[in-house]
Image (tube, rainbow, N blue to C red):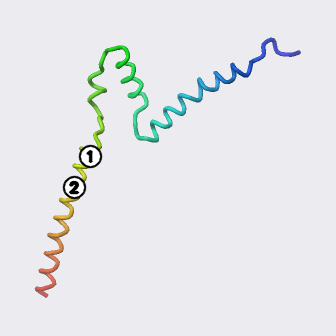
Amino acid sequence: MPPKYKVTGCARFFVFFIIFIPIVFFGAAYFRGENGMKIIKDYYHQVVGKSDSKSSTDNTYDPDERIKELEKELKAANDRIKELEEELKKEKNQN
């Protein structure tokens, strides 16, 4: 007995993409280190007109700020290395 309804190729295509597109979106967001749900919520609030001040101000990533922080850390580490090298030279000279 054949089935009552046949699923066409076009319907299979749409069902596949309804399942496939969200998986790819969230996978790519996770791979980039972002929060997929936050992206969707921010876009929704941008389209609707409401702004979720909490989600838009939290976790904003500024590469320039991060670079400055890392440069400060690097400078502090280099200064500490120089201090320790000087102490080591003094210890070697005393012995």
Q: Quadrant of the N terminus?
A: top right
Disc 1 marks which amino acid?
Answer: Arg
Q: Residue at x 30, y 38 (%)?
A: 61
Task: Residue at the far right: name it.
Answer: 1
Q: Residue at x 12, y 85 (%)?
A: 93
Q: Position of residue 53 (x, y in %)?
A: 26, 23
Q: Residues within 10 Å of mark 1 (few under 14, many from 20)?
A: few
Q: Looking at the image, is mark 2 or mark 1 earlier in the sequence?
A: 1
Residue at the disc numbered 2: 73
Q: Quadrant of the C terminus?
A: bottom left
Is residue 53 placed above or below 26 in the rendered structure? above
Secondary element type, mark 1: helix
Disc 2 marks which amino acid?
Answer: Glu
Is residue 91 placed above or below 75 in the rendered structure? below
Snapshot quadrant of residue 59: top left
Is residue 21 placed above or below 28 in the rendered structure? above
Is residue 82 placed above or below 64 in the rendered structure? below
Secondary element type, mark 2: helix
Q: Residue at x 43, y 41 (%)?
A: 32
Q: Which mark is residue 46?
A: none
Number of on-image labels: 2
Q: CA distance from mark 2 to mark 1?
A: 11 Å
Of marks 2 and 1, the one in the foreground: 1
Q: Residue at x 16, y 64 (%)?
A: 79
Snapshot quadrant of residue 84: bottom left
Residue at the disc numbered 1: 66
Along the horizontal axis of the image, is 34 left or right of 89? right
Q: Residues within 10 Å of mark 2 (few under 14, many from 20)?
A: few
